[in-house]
């Protein structure tokens, strides 16, 4: 189901994971501002409800769903609800993720499995659950949020880097398979974005802080969630129909 607003801009149904805060919330807000009906998926149902309420109060269309992306059954159930509430899904943005800082020798099997379950398996489950709608429509936009650390490597983050590298590989594989069906698949690997996750890492002593890294970037500033959201909105638009299988770095030139 595709609606149009007064400017004849298509209004589609979008799922954004990790949408209660940070990059995910900025993307959900941007897509809603562009007239899409947005489903906010997050492990924190309360935070997702608050975020959705703020969007609705601004006159936008959004609904929150309590979802653990690491649980395929939870994902499937939520996707069914989105179809019931909004209609067939044609945009998926996978922003949900966890990061950990642990020396390689000290990473436990439980830590490894949890990071991959959320970051890689969760991405797979959310996309797979929604793709049938896109295939039926002959149109779809999928954007994965990976990480520049998967391009450059990062110490004490082997499990995180591996999971995000897997996301990049999955993105390319899906682009090759799905693009002939009208579905583009791209990834944004951000770097140095001022988010609650970055602040938590700083507070824990794992990260020097965005203000320390900012002067090292060619643009001499840190990124914001809105910077990522702007790139994502383009990739989800009609105008990006010839862009697929690409990594669109939103990193201030920190990784070139």
Image (spheres, rainbow, N blue to C red):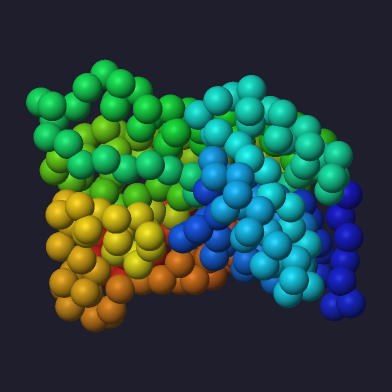
Horizontally, residue 215 falls left or right of residue 100, namely left
Residue 139, visible in the rendered structure = yes
Residue farthest to the top, as pictured:
109
Horizontally, residue 95 falls left or right of residue 110, namely right
Q: Quadrant of residue 99?
A: top left
Residue at 30% x, 73% y is 222
232 to 33, vertically: above or below:
above
Residue farthest to the bottom, as pictured:
220
On the image, the x and y values in percent for residue 48 come to: 61, 52
**Nearest the camera: 49 or 194?**
49
Residue at 38% x, 63% y is 195
103 to 205, vertically: above or below:
above
Residue at 86% x, 39% y is 84
Horizontally, residue 80 falls left or right of residue 24, namely right
On the image, the x and y values in percent for residue 18 come to: 53, 48
Residue at 21% x, 74% y is 211
On the image, the x and y values in percent for residue 199 come to: 30, 61
Q: Quadrant of residue 120?
A: top left
């Amino acid at each position: 189901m595709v609606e149009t607003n007064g400017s004849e801009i298509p209004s589609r149904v979008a799922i954004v994971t990790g949408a209660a805060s940070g990059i995910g919330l900025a993307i959900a807000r941007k897509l809603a501002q562009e007239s899409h009906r947005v489903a906010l998926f997050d492990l924190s149902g309360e935070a997702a409800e608050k975020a959705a309420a703020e969007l609705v109060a601004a006159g936008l269309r959004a609904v929150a769903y309590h979802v653990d992306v690491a649980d395929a059954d939870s994902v499937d159930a939520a996707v069914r609800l989105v179809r019931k509430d909004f209609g067939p899904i044609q945009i998926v943005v996978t922003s949900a993720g966890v990061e950990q800082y642990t020396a390689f020798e000290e990473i436990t099997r439980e830590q490894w499995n949890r990071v991959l379950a959320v970051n890689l398996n969760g991405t797979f489950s959310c996309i797979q659950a929604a793709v049938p709608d896109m295939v039926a429509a002959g149109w779809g936009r999928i954007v994965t949020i990976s990480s520049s650390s998967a391009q450059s490597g990062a110490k004490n983050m082997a499990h995180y880097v591996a999971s995000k590298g897997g996301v990049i590989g999955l993105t390319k594989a899906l682009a090759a398979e799905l693009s002939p069906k009208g579905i583009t698949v791209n990834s944004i690997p951000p770097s140095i974005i001022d988010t609650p996750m970055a602040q938590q890492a700083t507070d824990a002593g794992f990260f020097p802080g965005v203000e320390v890294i900012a002067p090292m970037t060619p643009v001499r500033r840190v990124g914001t969630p809105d910077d990522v959201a702007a790139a994502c909105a383009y990739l989800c638009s009609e105008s990006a129909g010839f862009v697929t299988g690409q990594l669109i770095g939103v990193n201030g030139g920190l990784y070139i």
